[in-house]
Amino acid sequence: MKKQLDKLKTKLPPVRVPGKNLVLTARALTAEIEYRAWTNDGKLRHPSFKGLRDPEDTSEIYRLPD
């Protein structure tokens, strides 16, 4: 996956994220993430990377209402 991400490096972030020493990539890959809940400040609680999704599956991505 690192080789895929290295090809997508960019200087302009698609979303502003605070932090130091970040490596930014263009939005081209979609990850499958499992998590317990959302925190009050909008972060994922106990996230776990499950793998990359097929590009055809991106139309099924959504966030459930709070």
Image (spheres, rainbow, N blue to C red):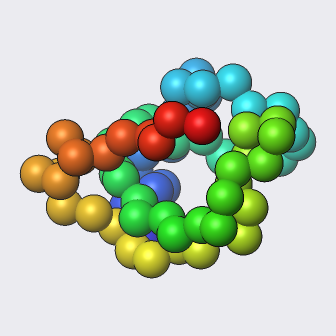
> Picture coordinates of residue 60 (x, y %)?
22, 46
Q: Residue at x 48, y 55 (%)?
A: 6
Q: Nearer the viewer, residue 42 or 25?
A: 42
Relative side of 7 to 18, left or right: left
Relative side of 57 to 43, left or right: left
Whether residue 61 can be seen here: yes
Relative side of 23 to 53, left or right: right
Residue closest to the far right: 20
Does residue 32 sit above or below 9 in this rendering? below
> Picture coordinates of residue 42 (x, y %)?
73, 38
Whether residue 2 can be seen here: no
Does residue 54 sit above or below 10 in this rendering? below
Quadrant of the snapshot with the N terminus = bottom left
Residue closest to the far left: 56
Q: Residue at x 49, y 65 (%)?
A: 33
Q: Residue at x 60, y 66 (%)?
A: 35
> Picture coordinates of residue 66 (x, y %)?
60, 37
Q: Nearer the viewer, residue 66 or 46?
A: 66
Q: Residue at x 82, y 40 (%)?
A: 40
